[in-house]
């Protein structure tokens, strides 16, 4: 640090007062009070995918369908919004959604994950692996980023095969 920088810092530091160290409210509780508190329920962890099935990344679709995906003019059969969910909740919701969609013969699905911090949120990053670990993985034809009208970078189209 140069002398000039030191002078500026010293003049700034003179105007700042130290705060007294305070104990947190949790530290003040007596041992008998904490013993009566019920333990928090354990959160279930997201199961790691066992050997992910191969979901084709670069499969080419018909020209008309690719254009409909880019334009956002594809008619959607079902939508799932995972915003605000933790990983375990999101995985359970996705598994239930995919099971109902497969049973109902839905083919054009939209899964909204959100972008997350820096554009690579946890849900967005794990979606492909989660889909690959589901029993319906073999029924998935393709996964594509959604058009801006349907959520852009924070959403994905999941296209299912015909039965």
Image (cartoon, rainbow, N blue to C red):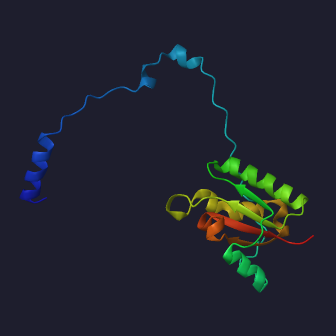
Name which residue lies at 67% across and 59% down: 112
| Along the viewing direction, whichever of 163 and 32 lies nearer the viewer | 163
Name which residue lies at 73% across and 77% down: 68
| Along the viewing direction, whichever of 23 and 86 lies nearer the viewer | 86
Query: Which quadrant of the figure contains the N terminus?
Result: bottom left
Q: Position of residue 145 (x, y in %)?
A: 66, 71
| Above/below status of 144 relative to 12 | below
Name which residue lies at 80% across and 59% down: 134
| Along the viewing direction, whichever of 94 and 79 lies nearer the viewer | 79
In-image side of 80 versus 15 (left or right): right
The residue furthest bottom is 63
| Above/below status of 36 relative to 7 | above
In-image side of 136 versus 19 (left or right): right
Name which residue lies at 10% across and 47% down: 10
Q: Position of residue 3 (x, y in %)?
A: 6, 57
Observer able to see residue 27: yes
Query: Which quadrant of the figure contains the C terminus?
Result: bottom right
The mark total stands at: 0
The residue furthest right is 163
Q: Position of residue 2 (x, y in %)?
A: 10, 60
Q: In which quadrant of the rendered view does residue 138 lie?
A: bottom right
| Above/below status of 155 relative to 38 | below
Q: In which quadrant of the rendered view does residue 14 lie?
A: top left
The residue furthest top is 32
Observer able to see residue 51: no
Q: Position of residue 27 (x, y in %)?
A: 43, 23
């Amino acid at each position: 640090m140069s002398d000039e920088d030191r002078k500026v810092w010293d003049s700034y530091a003179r105007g700042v007062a130290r705060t007294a160290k305070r104990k947190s409210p949790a530290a003040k509780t007596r041992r008998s009070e904490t013993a009566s508190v019920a333990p928090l329920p354990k959160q279930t962890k997201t199961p790691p995918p066992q050997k992910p099935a191969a979901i084709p990344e670069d499969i080419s679709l018909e020209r008309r369908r690719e254009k409909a995906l880019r334009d956002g003019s594809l008619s959607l059969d079902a939508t799932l919004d995972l915003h605000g969910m933790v990983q375990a909740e999101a995985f359970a919701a996705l598994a239930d959604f995919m099971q109902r969609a497969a049973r109902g013969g839905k083919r054009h699905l939209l899964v909204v994950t959100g972008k997350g911090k820096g554009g690579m949120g946890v849900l967005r990053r794990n979606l492909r692996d989660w889909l690959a670990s589901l029993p319906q993985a073999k029924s998935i034809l393709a996964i594509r980023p959604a058009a801006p009208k349907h959520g852009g970078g924070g959403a994905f189209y999941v296209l299912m095969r015909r039965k």
